Amino acid sequence: MLTIISATLISISIYLSKPLPYLKPTKQIANRKLFKKEEKLNVQEIREVVELLSLALYSGMTVPMAIRNLNQFCESNLAKQLLSAVNSQSLGANLNQELQVISAKNKYWKLITSQLQISWEQGASITDNLIELNEFFIDLERAQILKKVKSAGVRSVIPLGLCFLPAFMLVVVIPLIAGLIQF
């Protein structure tokens, strides 16, 4: 009986010590991973852009001036995209079309660019809208943090379960099987 138990434990330890086989991803899987990597966003960077834009527009700057000044203090990808749109607008392109191109890249960028389009077309102040948008991103950031915290509790229980499972097998299951074999 002891040899069966030791053979079982040895086979389990050998199985767990082997590395898992490497599966070469297909082009579809590789493309999907790349897309998800681009889709993954840092809400804190977007919130920083919104805060700086609202401060600049609240101080009386125009939209192009606010975006140019934004890039001096923020190095996020969104700020660079907005600066390229403003630079192409100064070369003769339509700012609304440039902002639509930027908004197609990310669903949260669309919220910002739509507000900038409204301000550019109508000349309306959008500082209140940007402040509300900033509050939305704060809530979104809190939700992401709560999600990570909740998943940390579950992940911390998995090693504990893996530690107690072999002991449970040795103390409860194997004697039960041994008792049933003796009948």
Image (cartoon, rainbow, N blue to C red):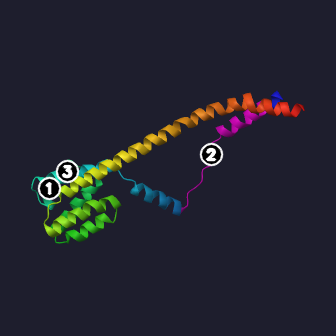
Label whose residue precedes the other's in the sequence (2 or 1) = 2
| 149 with respect to 44 (left or right) | right
SS label for mark 1: helix
Residue at the right extreme, as displayed? 183
Q: Residue at x 68, y 29 (%)?
A: 167
In the figure, 81 relative to 134: above or below?
Answer: below
Work out whether residue 106 can be spotted.
no
- Crowding around mark 2 (Cα neighbors within 10 Å: few <14, some 14 to 19, many 20+) is few
Amino acid type indicated by mark 2 = Leu
Residue 169 lies, in percent from the top left, at 72, 32
Residue mark closest to the camera, 2 vs 3: 3
Q: Quadrant of residue 85?
A: bottom left
Task: Tell whether position 17 is magenta.
Answer: yes
Amino acid type indicated by mark 3 = Leu
Find disc 1 in the rendering and name its residue.
57
Residue 156 lies, in percent from the top left, at 52, 35
Residue 116 lies, in percent from the top left, at 21, 63
| 20 with respect to 5 (left or right) | left
- Using the numbered discs, state the Cα–Cα distance from disc 2 to disc 1 in whole angstroms: 55 Å
The numbered mark at residue 20 is 2
Amino acid type indicated by mark 1 = Leu
Find disc 3 in the rendering and name its residue.
52
Q: Quadrant of residue 122?
A: bottom left
Give the total of numbered labels: 3
Q: Which residues are magenta?
A: 5-27
- Using the numbered discs, state the Cα–Cα distance from disc 1 to disc 3 in whole angstroms: 9 Å
Q: Residue at x 48, y 61 (%)?
A: 31
The numbered mark at residue 42 is none
Q: Locate the C terminus and report the quarter of the image it occupies.
A: top right
Q: Quadrant of residue 170?
A: top right
Check contact, mark 2 vs mark 1: CB within 8 A.
Answer: no
